[in-house]
Amino acid sequence: MNIRGIISRIIAAVLGFIRPSVAKIVKQFEAIQARLDKLIALHEHKLDRIDIDLEASKARARAAAEREEERRFGLYQDRDRRVSELERAQRVRDKINSLIS
């Protein structure tokens, strides 16, 4: 056997040894990648749900703020109405007092 034959057999033996290991490693990396893809998809789904919940929460907060503003506006209107009634009652009282005097 010449040196070339020996070297080629050594290379073949080494590659035969390396190839199955490389194939195993590649399969393991593919499995890890598949698990990571699932995990990423799960987290993206959770983030989407959080975004939806956040938007719904913002909408509820805006609606509550609008209701509070309407309530306050109603209170101001009620106060203004009572003030005008008070002023009218005071004018009537002043007229009655002026007629009595």
Image (cartoon, grey):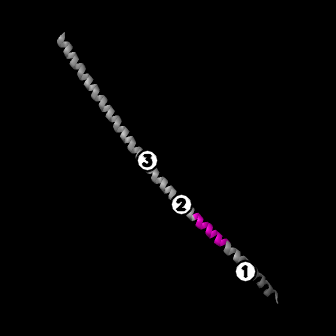
Q: Which portion, as a residue range, is magenta?
A: 25-36
* Residue 59, magenta (yes or no): no
- Residue indicated by mark 2: 42
Q: Is residue 86 above or below residue 30?
A: above
Measured in 3D between alpha carbons, the distance from the residue under mark 1 to the one under mark 2, in whole angstroms, is 39 Å
Query: Residue placed farthest to the top in the image?
Result: 101
Residue at left offset 54%, top offset 58%: 43
- Residue indicated by mark 1: 16
Quadrant position of the C terminus in the picture: top left
Sequence-first tag of 1 and 2 = 1
Q: Is 3 placed left or right of 82 in the picture?
A: right
Residue at left offset 70%, top offset 74%: 21
Sequence-first tag of 3 and 2 = 2
In the rendering, at what x and y percent does residue 22 appear? 69, 74
Measured in 3D between alpha carbons, the distance from the residue under mark 3 to the one under mark 1, in whole angstroms, is 62 Å
Classify 10 Å Cα crowding around label 1: few (below 14), some (14-19), many (20 and above).
few
- Marks 1/2 in contact by CB < 8 Å: the verdict is no
Q: Quadrant of residue 71?
A: top left
The amino acid pointed to by label 2 is: Leu
The amino acid pointed to by label 3 is: Lys
Q: Determine the secondary structure under disc 2.
A: helix
Residue 73 tag number: none
Q: Determine the secondary structure under disc 1.
A: helix
Residue 58 tag number: 3
In the rendering, at what x and y percent does residue 25 appear? 67, 71
Q: Determine the secondary structure under disc 3.
A: helix
